[in-house]
Image (cartoon, helix red, strand yellow):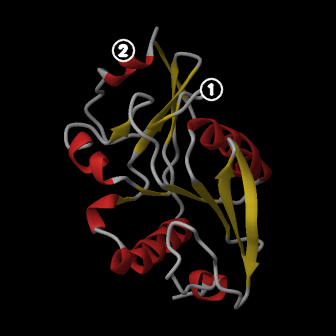
């Protein structure tokens, strides 16, 4: 990741920035930090999961890696691997694919852990705290290295672990109670 030399005094100022590319940036201490491209494996897992959720919800309410989520703390924004929106988000996101702090939180956020310890720490600790603080009801940490899907539910302002699912143990989701998906299916090489 590289940082730019541009300095923003507010998130609103950042939102008006356009460098004419599709490059994604996190805003860290007022500066842009370029995000690397998503790994092919993580993209495959996110796409497979999206396809599993489509029968249960309007496809317009499921967004992939390009959705920007404003959060409290540093960085001030995140780009989850998969996000399940609320109905009102569909209209709100037509102009810009950013869920602002002034908007209701999404229903579910999924992060797929990339290799390397810094990525693990970011998904298991940093993002968990920011998503919890943002009031996101359900957070999944999908870990291809350990072949585990951790499902967290927000209760009284704090995430509680619903389960760490692996192998053929069906993933339990409060957002999608009819979903019948196992980590073995999710992590299967295709």
In percent of width and height, residue 148 lies at 73, 73
Q: How many marks?
A: 2
Point 40% across, 58% down: residue: 64
Which residue appears farthest toward the top when viewing the image? 9
Whole-number angstrom distance, CA of label 2 to CA of label 1:
16 Å
Q: Is residue 84 above or below residue 183?
A: above
Q: Is residue 90 above or below residue 96?
A: below
Point 71% across, 60% down: residue: 115
Specify the quadrant of the image occupied by residue 52.
bottom left
Of residues 45 and 136, which is closer to you in this image? 136
Is 73 on the left-hand or right-hand side of 55?
Answer: right
In percent of width and height, residue 45 lies at 52, 73
Is 70 on the left-hand or right-hand side of 103?
Answer: right
Question: Would you name the residue on which mark 1 appears?
Answer: 74
Of residues 182 and 121, which is closer to you in this image? 182
Question: Would you name the residue on which mark 2 appears?
Answer: 13
Point 38% across, 49% down: residue: 66
> Judging from the image, what secondary structure is the residue with disc 1 in?
loop
Mark positioned earlier in the residue sequence (2 or 1): 2
Is 161 on the left-hand or right-hand side of 101?
Answer: right
Specify the quadrant of the image occupied by residue 101.
top left
């Amino acid at each position: 990741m590289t940082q730019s030399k541009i300095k923003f005094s507010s998130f609103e100022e950042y939102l008006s920035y356009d460098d004419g590319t599709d490059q994604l940036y996190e805003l860290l201490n007022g500066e842009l930090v370029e995000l690397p491209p998503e790994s092919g494996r993580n993209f495959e897992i996110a796409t497979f999961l999206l396809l599993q959720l489509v029968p249960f919800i309007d496809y317009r309410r499921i967004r992939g890696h390009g959705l920007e989520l404003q959060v409290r703390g540093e960085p001030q924004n995140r780009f989850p691997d998969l996000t399940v929106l609320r109905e009102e988000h569909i209209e709100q996101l037509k102009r810009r694919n950013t869920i602002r702090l002034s908007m209701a939180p999404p229903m579910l956020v999924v992060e797929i852990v990339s290799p390397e310890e810094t990525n693990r720490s970011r998904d298991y600790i940093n993002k968990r705290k920011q998503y919890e603080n943002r009031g996101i009801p359900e957070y999944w940490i999908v870990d291809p290295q350990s072949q585990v899907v951790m499902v967290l539910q927000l209760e009284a302002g704090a995430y509680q672990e619903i389960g760490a699912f692996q192998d053929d143990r069906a993933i339990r989701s409060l957002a999608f109670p009819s979903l019948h998906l196992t980590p073995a299916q999710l992590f299967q090489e295709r």
